[in-house]
Image (tube, rainbow, N blue to C red):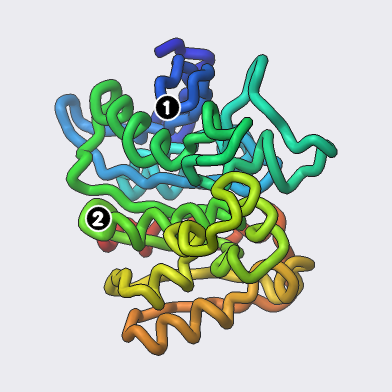
Amino acid sequence: METISTNRSHDGIQGVYRHASAATGTDMTFSVYVPPHAEGARLPVVWYLSGLTCTHANVTEKGEFRSACAELGLIFVAPDTSPRGEGVPDDPEGAYDFGLGAGFYVDATQEPFSRHYRMWSYVTDELPGIIGESFPADMTRQSIMGHSMGGHGALTIGLTLPDRFRAVSAFSPIVAPGAVPWGQKALAGYLGEDKAAWRRHDAVALIEDGARVPELLVDQGAADQFLDGQLQPHRLRDACDAAGIGLTLGLHEGYDHSYYFISTFMETQLRWHAARL
Protein backbone atom coordinates (compact mmCIF):
# COMPACT_ATOMS: atom_id res chain seq x y z
CA MET A 1 0.00 0.00 0.00
CA GLU A 2 1.37 3.40 -1.04
CA THR A 3 0.60 6.52 0.96
CA ILE A 4 -0.32 9.34 -1.41
CA SER A 5 -0.99 11.98 1.23
CA THR A 6 -1.72 12.48 4.92
CA ASN A 7 -3.12 15.61 6.55
CA ARG A 8 -3.92 16.39 10.18
CA SER A 9 -7.57 17.30 10.70
CA HIS A 10 -9.55 17.59 13.95
CA ASP A 11 -6.53 15.98 15.65
CA GLY A 12 -6.88 12.90 13.49
CA ILE A 13 -5.26 11.89 10.18
CA GLN A 14 -6.90 12.10 6.77
CA GLY A 15 -5.00 9.80 4.44
CA VAL A 16 -5.21 8.87 0.78
CA TYR A 17 -3.71 5.54 -0.29
CA ARG A 18 -3.16 3.44 -3.40
CA HIS A 19 -2.60 -0.27 -3.89
CA ALA A 20 -2.58 -2.91 -6.60
CA SER A 21 -5.96 -4.64 -6.46
CA ALA A 22 -6.29 -8.34 -7.15
CA ALA A 23 -10.06 -7.95 -7.51
CA THR A 24 -9.98 -5.33 -10.25
CA GLY A 25 -6.57 -5.99 -11.75
CA THR A 26 -5.80 -2.26 -11.47
CA ASP A 27 -4.37 0.21 -9.01
CA MET A 28 -7.11 1.45 -6.69
CA THR A 29 -7.14 4.63 -4.61
CA PHE A 30 -9.10 5.11 -1.40
CA SER A 31 -9.21 7.50 1.55
CA VAL A 32 -9.33 6.79 5.28
CA TYR A 33 -9.90 9.21 8.13
CA VAL A 34 -8.59 7.94 11.48
CA PRO A 35 -9.78 10.05 14.42
CA PRO A 36 -7.66 10.76 17.50
CA HIS A 37 -7.53 7.69 19.73
CA ALA A 38 -5.58 6.07 22.52
CA GLU A 39 -2.63 3.93 21.51
CA GLY A 40 -3.76 0.36 20.95
CA ALA A 41 -7.45 1.26 20.69
CA ARG A 42 -9.52 -0.34 17.93
CA LEU A 43 -12.21 1.87 16.43
CA PRO A 44 -15.48 1.15 14.58
CA VAL A 45 -15.51 1.63 10.80
CA VAL A 46 -18.04 3.49 8.65
CA TRP A 47 -17.88 2.73 4.92
CA TYR A 48 -19.00 5.45 2.51
CA LEU A 49 -19.77 4.53 -1.12
CA SER A 50 -19.86 7.38 -3.62
CA GLY A 51 -22.10 8.05 -6.60
CA LEU A 52 -21.88 8.34 -10.36
CA THR A 53 -18.83 10.21 -11.76
CA CYS A 54 -17.22 10.35 -8.30
CA THR A 55 -13.94 9.08 -6.88
CA HIS A 56 -12.84 8.80 -3.25
CA ALA A 57 -12.09 12.53 -3.40
CA ASN A 58 -15.63 13.91 -3.58
CA VAL A 59 -16.71 12.97 -0.09
CA THR A 60 -13.19 13.37 1.27
CA GLU A 61 -13.09 17.00 0.17
CA LYS A 62 -16.77 17.98 0.45
CA GLY A 63 -18.47 15.57 2.86
CA GLU A 64 -17.71 17.48 6.10
CA PHE A 65 -17.51 14.26 8.13
CA ARG A 66 -14.25 14.67 10.04
CA SER A 67 -15.48 16.77 12.94
CA ALA A 68 -18.22 14.27 13.78
CA CYS A 69 -15.92 11.27 13.26
CA ALA A 70 -13.33 12.82 15.58
CA GLU A 71 -15.93 13.40 18.27
CA LEU A 72 -17.56 9.99 17.89
CA GLY A 73 -14.40 7.93 17.36
CA LEU A 74 -15.27 6.62 13.89
CA ILE A 75 -12.90 5.53 11.13
CA PHE A 76 -14.32 6.72 7.79
CA VAL A 77 -13.38 4.77 4.63
CA ALA A 78 -14.15 6.02 1.10
CA PRO A 79 -13.29 3.70 -1.82
CA ASP A 80 -13.33 4.66 -5.48
CA THR A 81 -16.44 3.94 -7.57
CA SER A 82 -14.87 1.88 -10.35
CA PRO A 83 -11.55 0.53 -11.63
CA ARG A 84 -9.42 2.96 -13.60
CA GLY A 85 -6.28 2.88 -15.70
CA GLU A 86 -4.89 1.69 -19.00
CA GLY A 87 -6.98 -1.04 -20.59
CA VAL A 88 -10.06 -0.51 -18.41
CA PRO A 89 -13.08 -0.30 -20.73
CA ASP A 90 -15.42 2.68 -20.56
CA ASP A 91 -18.86 3.40 -21.96
CA PRO A 92 -18.34 3.30 -25.76
CA GLU A 93 -20.23 6.58 -26.10
CA GLY A 94 -18.49 8.25 -23.19
CA ALA A 95 -21.66 8.56 -21.09
CA TYR A 96 -21.32 9.43 -17.41
CA ASP A 97 -23.68 6.72 -16.15
CA PHE A 98 -21.74 3.62 -17.22
CA GLY A 99 -18.10 2.57 -17.22
CA LEU A 100 -15.46 4.71 -15.51
CA GLY A 101 -16.87 6.27 -12.36
CA ALA A 102 -19.96 4.08 -12.56
CA GLY A 103 -19.08 0.59 -11.37
CA PHE A 104 -22.44 0.16 -9.58
CA TYR A 105 -20.84 -2.06 -6.91
CA VAL A 106 -21.35 -5.30 -8.83
CA ASP A 107 -19.02 -7.99 -10.17
CA ALA A 108 -19.52 -7.78 -13.92
CA THR A 109 -20.08 -10.99 -15.85
CA GLN A 110 -20.22 -9.48 -19.34
CA GLU A 111 -17.30 -8.79 -21.66
CA PRO A 112 -15.34 -6.57 -21.85
CA PHE A 113 -16.18 -5.48 -18.29
CA SER A 114 -15.84 -8.75 -16.38
CA ARG A 115 -12.05 -8.60 -16.12
CA HIS A 116 -11.85 -5.32 -14.18
CA TYR A 117 -15.31 -4.30 -12.98
CA ARG A 118 -15.42 -6.33 -9.78
CA MET A 119 -16.40 -3.65 -7.30
CA TRP A 120 -18.57 -5.95 -5.17
CA SER A 121 -15.58 -8.19 -4.42
CA TYR A 122 -13.33 -5.19 -3.95
CA VAL A 123 -15.58 -3.42 -1.45
CA THR A 124 -16.83 -6.46 0.46
CA ASP A 125 -13.67 -8.60 0.52
CA GLU A 126 -10.35 -7.15 -0.61
CA LEU A 127 -10.46 -3.62 0.82
CA PRO A 128 -11.85 -4.70 4.23
CA GLY A 129 -8.84 -6.98 4.54
CA ILE A 130 -6.50 -4.05 3.96
CA ILE A 131 -8.38 -1.82 6.39
CA GLY A 132 -8.29 -4.48 9.10
CA GLU A 133 -4.56 -5.06 8.65
CA SER A 134 -3.32 -1.51 8.15
CA PHE A 135 -5.48 0.69 10.39
CA PRO A 136 -6.67 0.59 14.04
CA ALA A 137 -10.01 -0.80 12.93
CA ASP A 138 -12.37 -2.99 14.94
CA MET A 139 -13.78 -5.05 12.08
CA THR A 140 -16.43 -6.52 14.37
CA ARG A 141 -18.04 -3.06 14.39
CA GLN A 142 -18.76 -1.92 10.84
CA SER A 143 -21.52 0.09 9.20
CA ILE A 144 -22.13 1.30 5.66
CA MET A 145 -23.58 4.36 3.97
CA GLY A 146 -23.52 5.94 0.52
CA HIS A 147 -24.92 8.47 -1.94
CA SER A 148 -26.96 7.89 -5.10
CA MET A 149 -25.27 4.96 -6.91
CA GLY A 150 -23.31 4.53 -3.68
CA GLY A 151 -26.57 4.55 -1.73
CA HIS A 152 -27.63 1.66 -3.96
CA GLY A 153 -24.35 -0.06 -3.11
CA ALA A 154 -24.71 0.54 0.61
CA LEU A 155 -28.28 -0.76 0.69
CA THR A 156 -27.58 -3.88 -1.37
CA ILE A 157 -24.37 -4.74 0.49
CA GLY A 158 -25.96 -4.09 3.87
CA LEU A 159 -29.00 -6.19 3.02
CA THR A 160 -26.83 -9.02 1.70
CA LEU A 161 -24.40 -9.01 4.64
CA PRO A 162 -26.59 -8.08 7.63
CA ASP A 163 -24.35 -9.88 10.12
CA ARG A 164 -21.38 -7.71 9.15
CA PHE A 165 -22.93 -4.24 9.11
CA ARG A 166 -24.62 -2.98 12.26
CA ALA A 167 -26.16 0.03 10.51
CA VAL A 168 -27.10 0.86 6.91
CA SER A 169 -28.03 4.29 5.59
CA ALA A 170 -28.06 6.30 2.39
CA PHE A 171 -28.36 9.73 0.88
CA SER A 172 -30.58 9.91 -2.23
CA PRO A 173 -30.13 6.22 -3.13
CA ILE A 174 -31.12 4.41 -6.31
CA VAL A 175 -33.41 2.02 -4.43
CA ALA A 176 -34.75 -0.03 -7.36
CA PRO A 177 -32.16 0.03 -10.16
CA GLY A 178 -34.00 -2.66 -12.10
CA ALA A 179 -36.91 -0.24 -12.56
CA VAL A 180 -35.10 2.99 -13.54
CA PRO A 181 -32.91 4.03 -16.50
CA TRP A 182 -29.60 4.40 -14.64
CA GLY A 183 -29.87 0.95 -13.14
CA GLN A 184 -31.30 -0.79 -16.18
CA LYS A 185 -28.39 0.41 -18.32
CA ALA A 186 -25.76 -0.56 -15.75
CA LEU A 187 -27.19 -3.93 -14.74
CA ALA A 188 -27.72 -5.00 -18.34
CA GLY A 189 -24.25 -3.84 -19.33
CA TYR A 190 -22.45 -5.51 -16.43
CA LEU A 191 -24.65 -8.54 -15.73
CA GLY A 192 -26.45 -9.24 -19.01
CA GLU A 193 -30.15 -9.53 -19.73
CA ASP A 194 -31.01 -12.16 -17.10
CA LYS A 195 -33.09 -10.05 -14.74
CA ALA A 196 -32.89 -12.71 -12.04
CA ALA A 197 -29.21 -11.72 -11.66
CA TRP A 198 -30.25 -8.08 -11.34
CA ARG A 199 -32.37 -8.80 -8.27
CA ARG A 200 -29.28 -9.56 -6.16
CA HIS A 201 -28.21 -5.95 -6.77
CA ASP A 202 -31.54 -4.20 -6.27
CA ALA A 203 -32.48 -3.17 -2.72
CA VAL A 204 -36.23 -3.35 -3.26
CA ALA A 205 -35.95 -6.74 -4.98
CA LEU A 206 -33.68 -8.07 -2.21
CA ILE A 207 -36.28 -7.12 0.40
CA GLU A 208 -39.05 -8.65 -1.69
CA ASP A 209 -36.96 -11.83 -1.91
CA GLY A 210 -36.46 -12.05 1.86
CA ALA A 211 -33.43 -9.96 2.79
CA ARG A 212 -33.84 -8.34 6.19
CA VAL A 213 -32.18 -5.77 8.42
CA PRO A 214 -33.77 -4.26 11.54
CA GLU A 215 -33.83 -0.71 10.22
CA LEU A 216 -32.67 1.66 7.50
CA LEU A 217 -32.07 5.41 7.40
CA VAL A 218 -32.49 7.38 4.16
CA ASP A 219 -32.22 11.14 3.65
CA GLN A 220 -33.56 12.51 0.39
CA GLY A 221 -33.76 16.05 -0.99
CA ALA A 222 -37.25 17.02 -2.11
CA ALA A 223 -35.76 19.30 -4.80
CA ASP A 224 -33.50 16.53 -6.16
CA GLN A 225 -33.63 16.65 -9.96
CA PHE A 226 -33.40 12.84 -10.11
CA LEU A 227 -36.09 12.13 -7.50
CA ASP A 228 -38.94 10.94 -9.70
CA GLY A 229 -37.03 9.50 -12.65
CA GLN A 230 -34.13 7.63 -11.05
CA LEU A 231 -34.43 7.43 -7.25
CA GLN A 232 -38.09 6.77 -6.38
CA PRO A 233 -37.74 6.30 -2.61
CA HIS A 234 -41.43 5.41 -2.34
CA ARG A 235 -40.52 1.99 -3.73
CA LEU A 236 -38.21 1.37 -0.76
CA ARG A 237 -40.83 2.66 1.69
CA ASP A 238 -43.43 0.28 0.29
CA ALA A 239 -41.02 -2.69 0.36
CA CYS A 240 -39.95 -1.94 3.95
CA ASP A 241 -43.57 -1.53 5.08
CA ALA A 242 -44.45 -4.92 3.60
CA ALA A 243 -41.39 -6.60 5.15
CA GLY A 244 -41.63 -5.01 8.58
CA ILE A 245 -38.29 -3.19 8.24
CA GLY A 246 -38.10 0.06 10.15
CA LEU A 247 -37.36 2.75 7.57
CA THR A 248 -36.68 6.34 8.59
CA LEU A 249 -37.14 8.29 5.35
CA GLY A 250 -36.38 11.99 5.67
CA LEU A 251 -37.64 14.12 2.77
CA HIS A 252 -35.97 17.51 3.04
CA GLU A 253 -37.57 20.50 1.34
CA GLY A 254 -35.35 22.63 -0.88
CA TYR A 255 -32.36 20.24 -0.99
CA ASP A 256 -30.98 18.81 -4.23
CA HIS A 257 -28.66 15.91 -5.15
CA SER A 258 -25.39 17.69 -4.37
CA TYR A 259 -22.80 17.62 -1.59
CA TYR A 260 -24.41 20.75 -0.16
CA PHE A 261 -27.25 18.39 0.80
CA ILE A 262 -25.00 15.51 1.89
CA SER A 263 -22.77 17.68 4.06
CA THR A 264 -25.82 19.19 5.76
CA PHE A 265 -27.07 15.81 7.02
CA MET A 266 -23.75 13.95 7.30
CA GLU A 267 -23.39 14.54 11.03
CA THR A 268 -26.95 13.37 11.72
CA GLN A 269 -26.32 10.12 9.86
CA LEU A 270 -22.94 9.57 11.54
CA ARG A 271 -24.49 10.00 14.99
CA TRP A 272 -27.13 7.43 14.00
CA HIS A 273 -24.36 5.03 12.98
CA ALA A 274 -22.32 5.67 16.12
CA ALA A 275 -25.27 4.83 18.34
CA ARG A 276 -25.44 1.40 16.68
CA LEU A 277 -21.68 0.77 16.65
The amino acid beneath tag 2 is Leu
Q: Which of the two discs, 1 and 2, labels the residue nearer the N terminus? A: 1
> Residue at the spot x=53%, y=19% of the render?
26
Q: Name the mark on residue 277.
A: 2
Work out whether 218 lies above or below 197. below
Q: Is residue 31 visible?
A: yes
Q: Residue furthest top?
A: 2
- Of residue 114 and residue 126, the one placed in the foreground of this image is 114
> Residue at the spot x=51%, y=23% of the render?
28
Q: Residue furthest front?
A: 194
Question: How would you rate the neighbour count of disc 2 (Cα within 10 Å): few for under 14, some for 14-19, many for 20 or more?
Answer: some
The amino acid beneath tag 1 is Ala
Question: How would you rate the neighbour count of disc 1 (Cα within 10 Å): few for under 14, some for 14-19, many for 20 or more?
Answer: many
Q: x, y percentage for residue 135? A: 29, 26
Q: x, y percentage for residue 240? A: 41, 81
Taking the image as shown, residue 90 lies to the left or right of residue 47, namely right
Mark 1 and mark 2 in contact? Answer it, CB < 8 Å. no
Q: x, y percentage for residue 53? A: 70, 41
SS state under label 1: loop
The quadrant of the picture occupied by the N terminus is top left
Taking the image as shown, residue 152 lies to the left or right of residue 273, namely right
Q: Residue furthest left?
A: 40
SS state under label 2: loop
Name the residue carrying label 1.
Answer: 23
Q: Is residue 263 visible?
A: no
- Of residue 274 and residue 151, the one placed in the foreground of this image is 151
